[in-house]
Amino acid sequence: MSTPLDLDQLQSFCAIADCGSFTEAARRLNKTQSAVSMQIKRLEERLGQSLLTRDGRRVMLTLAGEALYARARKMLRTNAEILDHFSEGDLSGSIRFGVPDDYAVRLLPVILSSFQRTHPKIVVDVACMASEHLLEGMRAGRYDLIVFTQGTEQNYGELFRTEKMFWVASHGGRALASSPLAVACGPTFCIWRKDAQEALERTGLDYRIAYTSSNATAISSAVLSDLAIGFLPESALQPGMRVVNEDHGLPKLGDAQIALMRASHAYGGIYDALANHIVQSMGNLESAAQQQGEAAE
């Protein structure tokens, strides 16, 4: 019978894969770098494969390492679930959580306040910023859990919600009739901006980027102030916004995909408690488009 793999070795391997550094992984795991290096050596000997390679100063996964990573994550998650099943203690601790500011105004207060009522011993430290910055922060070890958009473009993200994207304008505003069409959007790295611009260019519609911000609240304010029209996912629509239908010649937008990403240690216990609460809360949202009214004036 084959000897089972060492979970501690798999934890170290995943930590290195997450941050791209033996030194940083050792710091996160509270181990010496030599101890982590020895664990990886033994894991590679056990599997008969090279799992990691250096690309300049960064440590990268080999093809065998990529094949192992997702499987190792599953084993770590199963281990956490078994420990949770037999644990009798109350859930307590702190979680570093990141969420795109698209959802901070409307959803975050409701979701987190209800979580705090049911889990008063868990402290959640929240950061709100663009998904790209959250993903960078996750790689740097600044978060335990993040919600981010366009989940299927990232490995290891757990896609849990797909929702429609809508063109929006201010009720009674004139921005929709501007020529060229004034558009408010995120910075050039924003995946929603890329999708919207490609859609506009396919239709040949004359437009200009009139307002740019990495802050979703600022973009919503630009729309509500009638400086420009914008585009938002269903759950980020706000009162005072008018959803513009396709009768105005605007192209259809691709769906927004929302995913959850965990650090390799963030399974079971307090992390599952928050992750499950977020997925259940956002999965049960009523249609914001129906609440705001989809019909254009």
Image: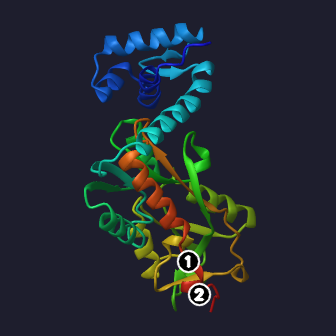
Query: Disc 1 marks which amino acid?
Result: Glu
Q: Position of residue 5 (x, y in %)?
A: 52, 19
Tell whether label 2 touches label 1 (CB within 8 Å): no
In the picture, the disc for residue 293 is: 2
Judged from the image, the secondary structure of the residue bearing numbered disc 1 is loop
- Of the numbered discs 1 and 2, the one sitting upstream in the chain is 1
In the picture, the disc for residue 286 is: 1
Give whichever of 184, 260 is nearer the camera. 260
Q: Position of residue 170 (x, y in %)?
A: 50, 84
Residue drawn at x 56%, y 48% is: 158
Give whichever of 289, 55 is nearer the camera. 289
Residue drawn at x 42%, y 61% is: 213
Is 192 on the left-hand or right-hand side of 10?
A: right
Q: In the picture, which quadrant includes the C terminus?
A: bottom right
Q: In the picture, which quadrant includes the N terminus?
A: top right
Q: How far apart are the alpha carbons under marks 1 and 2?
A: 13 Å
